[in-house]
């Protein structure tokens, strides 16, 4: 791929004797939405942790616009423009909704402080469908609204590459449509996204390309239609019991 925004080469993570991520190689182009798929335990969240700097790599490297980011502290990686959401939403319970979003701006790619951070947070809350809810305590929110706050907080750092870890998981069918529309709007404004996802509708309608993992290893890469009809991918999802 010419001029990828993000590249993983030989990215490997061992936890003791377990190879959770094994020599992963893939590129992400600017404005591309890449789905990272695979059964539970296949290493998707760990891969995002390695890219975002939450965990150190055992081997390999990650580059952003050709410069190495692996090995840098997580906050530095965020400041360079890579931000993520977590599979289990992590909001700060002592802060209200707006303050949680502002917290994302402070360490971001483009740092904002004071009034500017406040106003930007209000815009982002509007953007994710939480207009007027900035003063609520996070404990008062429904589940989908906590996900919205987390997304707004991640956007507050102005990420060049957005990593979404099963952001749609646990939503009911109505909320799922709202969530897909929201991610689609991020895609349409030209963001680069790695989407860890299980929801097939979302994968088909959002992803330009998919990378499929099983037991830490990349087993397929291609368009959603190609990978979802790939025999090896189907076998990995159904479990290989023969
Ligand atoms: P996925 O997100 O695809 O479900 P994970 O990346 O969470 O998979 O996990 C991949 C494998 O690594 C699993 O076997 C998991 O139990 C293991 N694992 C993940 N994080 C840790 C950790 N911090 N310590 C030990 N093992 C871990
Ligand atoms: Mg996971």
Image (cartoon, rainbow, N blue to C red):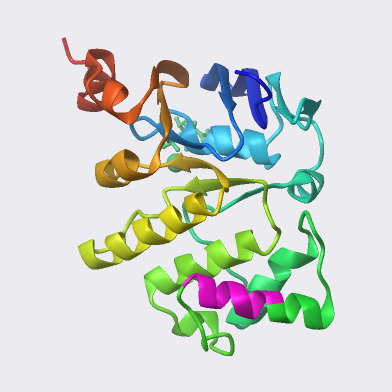
Q: Position of residue 185 (x, y in %)?
A: 46, 58
Location of residue 1 with respect to 176 vertically, above or below? above
| Quadrant of res 39 | top left
Residue 21 is inside the magenta segment: no
Residue 126 is inside the magenta segment: yes
Q: How many marks?
A: 0
User: Which image quarter is the C terminus in?
Assistant: top left
Residue at the limit of the structure toward the left, as seen here:
242
User: Which image quarter is the N terminus in?
Assistant: top right
User: Is residue 229 visible to us here?
Assistant: yes
Identify the residue at image location x=54%, y=54%: 189
- Which residues lie in the magenta part? 120-128
Identify the residue at image location x=62%, y=72%: 92
Q: Position of residue 86 (x, y in %)?
A: 53, 52
| Quadrant of res 172 | bottom left
Of the four image quadrants, the one with ligand 2 is: top left
Residue at the limit of the structure toward the top, as seen here:
242
Identify the residue at image location x=29%, y=66%: 175
Q: Nearer the viewer, residue 217 or 109?
A: 109
Left or right: residue 96 compared with residue 115: left
Q: Name the magenta segment's main secondary structure.
A: helix
Q: Position of residue 206 (x, y in %)?
A: 38, 44
| Quadrant of res 6 | top right
Q: Position of residue 207 (x, y in %)?
A: 40, 38
Q: Nearer the viewer, residue 91 or 241?
A: 91
Location of residue 191 with respect to 230 vertically, above or below? below
User: Is residue 94 visible to us here?
Assistant: no
């Amino acid at each position: 791929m010419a001029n990828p925004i993000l590249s993983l080469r030989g990215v490997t993570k061992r936890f003791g004797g377990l190879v959770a991520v094994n020599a992963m190689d893939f590129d992400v182009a600017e404005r591309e939405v890449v789905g990272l798929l695979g059964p539970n335990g296949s290493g998707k969240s760990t891969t995002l942790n390695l890219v975002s700097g939450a965990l150190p790599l055992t081997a390999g490297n990650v580059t952003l616009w050709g410069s190495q980011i692996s090995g840098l502290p997580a906050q530095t990686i965020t400041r360079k423009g890579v931000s993520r959401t977590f599979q289990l939403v992590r909001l700060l319970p002592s802060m209200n909704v707006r303050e949680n979003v502002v917290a994302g701006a402070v360490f971001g790619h483009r740092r904002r402080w004071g009034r500017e951070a406040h106003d930007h947070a209000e815009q982002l809350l509007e953007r994710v469908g939480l207009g007027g809810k900035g003063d609520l305590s996070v404990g008062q929110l429904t589940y989908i609204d906590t996900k919205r706050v987390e997304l707004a907080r991640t956007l507050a750092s102005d990420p060049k590459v957005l990593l979404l870890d099963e952001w749609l998981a646990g939503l009911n069918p109505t909320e799922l449509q709202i969530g897909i529309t929201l991610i689609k709007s991020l895609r349409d404004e030209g963001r680069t996204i790695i989407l860890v996802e299980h929801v097939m509708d979302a994968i088909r309608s959002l992803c330009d390309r998919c990378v499929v993992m099983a037991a830490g290893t990349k087993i397929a890469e291609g368009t959603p239609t190609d990978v979802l009809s790939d025999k090896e991918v189907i076998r990995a999802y159904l479990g290989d019991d023969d």
